[in-house]
């Protein structure tokens, strides 16, 4: 290899190292609070709020665009700020969380709606707790997301994210494993799939508005418009 080739190679390696370092520096550091519940979801029980927080944290890390504050570090701060119970952000609280955890933003989620529809399709068979066929299942989940700037304490982003799923054909009357913990039986159910869909959509939204900022917001605006139209259509104004 010529001296020129060696020199060019060193330059390229240097440029690559610099770009990787820059990319790491551009990551947004977030803290994901325990999710709250204002719905009548039957699968909501103790521990689910932190499980959803953990699922969203994992998805955010997987994008390689976010650093996420460890739950143990966040919990102590939330307890001090009395956010764990209230789910509200008081004046100056966001900035305090940023100072204590190193987070740029605090992400908060509240499950505001959950609907489930199970219909018989006929022809099903059942034997010793195992059912095959005979029903169709649907699930719908709505999550209100708020993002607080940990420097100013202001709420910067607000969005309702929806998750929908369908299932049916087979139902096992035994534990199927799943997300773990309180959601361990929901992995393959419509509820579990709706939860996963909402988590993925939340991740896409946060990456869009906090990292990409390239006009991708229009897709989420359109989804919000459709949600509002459905809500208006279901209102009885007579």
Image: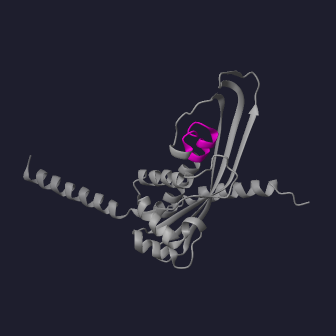
Tell whether position 200 is magenta. Answer: no
**What is the span of residues highlighted in magenta in the rendered image?**
183-196
Task: Give residue 211's position: percent from left, percent from top.
Answer: 46, 62
From the viewer's perspective, tell me whether residue 223 is left or right of residue 236: left
Q: Is residue 226 above or below residue 176?
A: below
Q: Position of residue 104 (x, y in %)?
A: 44, 69
Q: Is residue 173 left or right of residue 120?
A: left
Residue at 52% across, 70% down: 148
Q: Residue at point 20% right, 54% down?
A: 13
Q: Which of the 4 quarters of the picture holds residue 172?
A: top right
- Check the picture and name the quadrant holding the C terminus: bottom right
Q: Quadrant of residue 38?
A: bottom right
Does residue 87 appear anywhere in the picture? no
Q: Does 112 sit left or right of 103 as displayed?
A: right
- Assess whether residue 191 is covered by the magenta stretch: yes
Residue 134 at x, y = what percent? 72, 26
- In this orientation, which residue lies closer to the viewer: 221 or 54? 54
Camera-side residue of 104 and 232:
104
Which residue is at the front of the view, 34 or 207?
34
- Which of 218 and 6 lies nearest the eye of the viewer? 218
């Amino acid at each position: 290899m010529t001296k020129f080739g060696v020199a060019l190679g060193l330059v390229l390696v240097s440029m690559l190292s610099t770009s990787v370092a820059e990319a790491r520096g551009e990551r947004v550091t977030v803290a994901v609070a325990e999710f709250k519940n204002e719905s009548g979801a039957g699968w909501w029980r103790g521990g689910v709020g932190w499980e959803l927080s953990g699922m969203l944290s994992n998805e955010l890390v997987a994008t390689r665009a976010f650093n996420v504050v460890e739950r143990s570090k966040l919990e102590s701060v939330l307890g001090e700020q009395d956010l764990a119970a209230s789910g509200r952000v008081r004046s100056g609280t966001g900035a305090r969380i940023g100072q204590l955890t190193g987070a740029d933003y605090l992400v908060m989620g509240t499950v505001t709606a959950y609907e489930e529809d199970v219909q018989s399709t006929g022809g099903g068979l059942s034997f010793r707790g195992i059912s095959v066929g005979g029903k169709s299942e649907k699930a719908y989940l709505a999550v209100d997301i708020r993002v607080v700037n940990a420097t100013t304490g202001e709420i910067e982003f607000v969005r309702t994210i929806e998750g929908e799923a369908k299932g049916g054909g087979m139902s096992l009357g035994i534990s199927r494993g799943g997300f773990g913990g309180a959601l361990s039986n929901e992995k393959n159910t419509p509820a579990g799939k709706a939860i996963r869909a909402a988590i993925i959509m939340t991740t896409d939204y946060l990456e869009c508005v906090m990292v990409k900022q390239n006009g991708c917001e229009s897709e989420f605006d359109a989804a919000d418009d459709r949600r509002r139209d459905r809500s208006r259509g279901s209102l009885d104004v007579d």
